Amino acid sequence: MWNEVAVARLAMLRPEVYGGWEPERLTSALKPYGVPTGQVWGKTEEGKGANRRGFERARVTAAIADGDGKWAAG
């Protein structure tokens, strides 16, 4: 998932926590949980393919499952 998409969705879900986040802040927030970011292939809303910074959702799910229950917004 692209960071920019994730940040927009998080802001819609919890604007009081994630409103105003930039994609770079998400990268920083994921790092302590061992979730790497890198180039991820996806499609724009117009259907054009592109590489952008993002992460694998499975890595986030694994970090939550393996965590100590302290997964929270940074």
Image: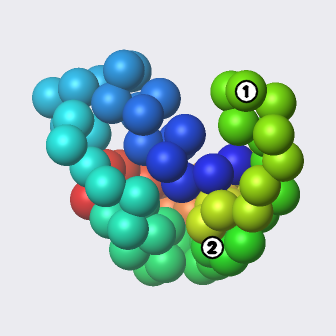
20 vs 70: above or below? above
Q: Nearer the viewer, residue 54 or 46?
A: 46
Secondary structure found at label 1: loop
Q: Nearer the viewer, mark 1 or mark 2?
A: 1
Which residue is label 2 attached to?
Answer: 37
Residue 67 seen: yes
51 vs 2: above or below? below
Q: Earlier in the sequence, mark 1 or mark 2?
A: 2
Outermost residue, left direction? 16
Quarter location, residue 19 = top left
Q: Is residue 39 left or right of residue 47?
A: left
Residue occupying image coordinates x 49% and y 78% = 31
- Residue 2 - label: none
Secondary structure found at label 2: loop
Q: Nearer the viewer, residue 52 or 32?
A: 52
Q: Nearer the viewer, residue 5 or 28?
A: 5
49 vs 37: above or below? above
Using the numbered discs, state the Cα–Cα distance from disc 1 to disc 2 in whole angstroms. Answer: 24 Å
Q: Is residue 70 left or right of residue 19?
A: right
Residue 56 coordinates in the image, percent (x, y): 76, 58
Dot 2 amino acid type: Thr
Residue occupying image coordinates x 41% and y 58% = 23
Which residue is label 1 attached to?
Answer: 46
